[in-house]
Amino acid sequence: MNNPLTTEQHDSVWSPLYQQRAFRALMSAFSFPGRRQPLPLCSDATGPTCIAAVLCDNEVSLADPDQLIQPADIRRLGIREASLENAGFIIADGSRAPDFAPALGSLAEPEQGATIIVRVASLESTNDFPLMLEGPGIQDTQALAVSGLNRAWLAERARWNRNFPMGADLILVDDTQVVALPRTTRIRGGTN
């Protein structure tokens, strides 16, 4: 059956074509931690909403303490809102220090650890916040520079992930790119 969607509709975060493209970008980001992946152009949402639209449905819970997703989009996603400690997904402003303890899962169910979608100012190459990454999916080391990420995120992430396989996965996103930092990724740096 032919679909009469226009190009503009394909650029909508609610378009199945957009979500398929964004999902591929996100899977590439998790396959190659620390490597910037371009998000498809989106005409009606910001980076955090784009990632939430790909990952979230009515089977998961979400906490958005910084209100980075519009209430109408939360309703449209059909997700259950939850406390920070119990949410499967958390949307957070990277410029603010994290002041919460996310779900970290258990030894029996490490997959119950939260995925935190962190909004940053930019993932473009910069000398503002140089990081060196190592671990699965990275051949030797991967350099990453981030603008708009409070340094406290690195200390908290290390604390949350100290009892591997329990922990939390991070997804850094601006409006055009995404980077995955799974709990298996080791991070050094974060200073000028």
Image (cartoon, rainbow, N blue to C red):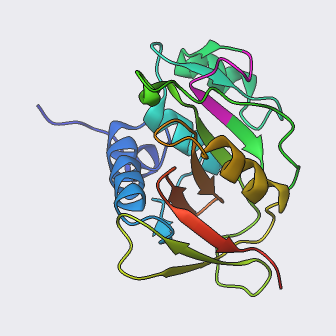
15 up-or-down from 106: above or below: below
- Residue sitting farthest toward the left: 1
* Residue 78 appears left or right of 67: left
**Closer to the camera, 12 or 181?**
181
Instruction: Quadrant for residue 152, please give it.
Output: bottom right
Residue at x 62% of width, y 40% of height: 116
Q: Magenta stretch: dominant SS?
A: loop
In the image, residue 118 lies at what x, y percent?
Answer: 68, 49
Question: What's drawn in magenta, residue-wise?
Answer: 83-90
**Closer to the camera, 96 or 176?**
96
In the image, residue 50 lies at what x, y percent?
Answer: 55, 44
Residue 14 in sight = no
162 up-or-down from 39: above or below: above
Residue at x 58% of width, y 40% of height: 168
What is the quadrant of the N terminus in the image? top left
* Residue 2 appears left or right of 150: left
What is the quadrant of the C terminus in the image? bottom right
